[in-house]
Amino acid sequence: MRSGGLTSRRRFLSVLGAGTLSIVGATGQTASAETERSNWAYDTGEGFWDSSPTVVNGTVFAAGTETLYAIDANAGTERWVHEFDHLGTSSPAVVDGTVFVGDQNGVVTALDAETGAERWAFETDDVVDSSPTVVDGTVFVGSWDDSVYAIDAETGIERWSVETHEGVVSSPVVTGGVLYVGSMDGRLYALDAATGTEQWRFETDGPINASPTVASGTVFVPSFDRHLYALDAKTGTEQWSVELHPPIDWDFGGYTGRLRSSPTVANGTVYVGSFGKALHALDAETGALEWHFESEHVFQSSPTVVSDTVFVGSNSGGVVALDTADGSTRWADENAPSVSASPTVADGTVFVVDYDGVIHALDADVIGSGEGSRARLGTLGHHGSWQYADQEIDIPGGLLMTARRSLQDPGIPELLVGGGIVGSAGFLAHKKWNRSRPGENG
């Protein structure tokens, strides 16, 4: 871990200058909006991928390509940084003073939220692009090794794992004791959160790397097959599906990508972006289109809702705030010019990261924090009042632990504590080798 400011790579930026931008609104007319709404901007000097910020207890936690940053949410000043070999798209989750994040080396790491010190590390067999979520003391996360894992949040010990048939990039969502997660095999899986036992699965015609969301007993999930699906959360029965007709294709590791934006639900409306350069608002019960916002830019970012405003980032058009009633533009800002990560709104401020490695705090012109199902369930970044914010995480003895698999015996990991090694009688943070296929007990 490294702390302190590094002016050669990172600098605090003053409020950016005024300007205007033009953007095509829901009616197809051009709307002009002021861009003087930057509270602060923090330049990391490294690029960001699709990782969304998390804002808890006055601190913004954001992952760059190599570094996890903790930034004062009010002042934009650095609190600490923690260096990794290679981070990626995994958004940090923060619960009871502990930060959980995945990396490109296939490791899920738990860090002290106050200092950035490592507490434990859990190793999978491939890249972790999935964002962890923490429910009832368990960290749930997917990996490109085709598996979804349940890890004890205090010890880093695996509780169960279930193997799908392709990589799991989708971030799990847990509600009512059930975990919902998509796989690049095109299926949405519903698993018992306590055991990993499969409850049901639903098959689409394309890979799923967006994250599902759940509201009022319905699971909403997009697929690369261009459809948004609404499924009964208990049975997996399809309630409706809508093809959103993006006019462009995008290749992602051999897949033709269409829908990567994760949906959110607020006040009976589903909001989801598409590579068809549009943000769609659909009736959550019927799938009927309420409105869509057309843009010159691709919406890979996942929207968030506060009161009567929906916020979303675009790949080359900055952040847009739209009226939830009709999709008209409330404001648009290009201070963050290219945004694929999802914005997080906390206490009236939009926090977002851009491709250039700048963390932005923008005046949201609203009071409060994200209210949609995605923010409430803690998927892809969250704020401090999400549904499971009151969990207690007590890492045993306050030890700073790093677990690594033993080179001599892959079944017995080494546990490094303050430079020493604790054997198998100590706390073992490791991955199991006996995974279960979907439909078997984890």
Image (cartoon, grey):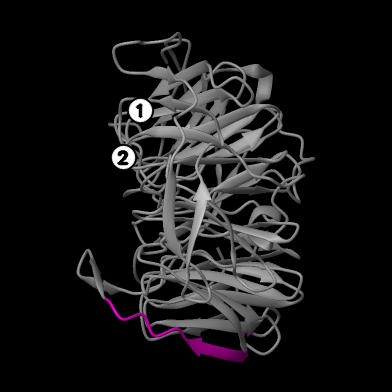
- For label 1, the crowd category at 10 Å Cα-Cα, with few meaning under 14, some 14 to 19 and many 20 or more, is some
| Magenta region, residue range | 236-248
Provide residue 88's location: percent of width, then percent of height. Answer: 35, 43
* Residue 246 among those drawn in magenta: yes
Q: In this view, does 202 lie above or below 309?
A: below
Q: Farthest residue toward the left?
A: 254
- Residue type indicated by callout 1: Phe
User: Label 2, label 1: how many angstroms apart (C-alpha)?
Assistant: 9 Å
Query: For this rendering, which residue is in front, 404 or 127?
Result: 127
Which residue occupies 47% across, 72% down? 29
State the image quarter where residue 103 is shown.
top left
Q: Farthest residue toward the right?
A: 390
Circle 2 is placed at which residue position?
A: 105
Q: In this view, does 257 lie to the left or right of 17?
A: left
Which residue occupies 49% across, 34% down? 360
2 and 1 marks in contact (CB < 8 Å):
yes
Q: Using the image, tell me which numbered label, if any, was put on residue 84.
A: 1
User: Mark 2 or mark 1: which comes first in sequence?
Assistant: 1
Query: For this rendering, which residue is in front, 82 or 358?
Result: 358
Provide residue 68's location: percent of width, then percent of height. Answer: 44, 29
Quadrant where the image shows the C terminus: bottom right
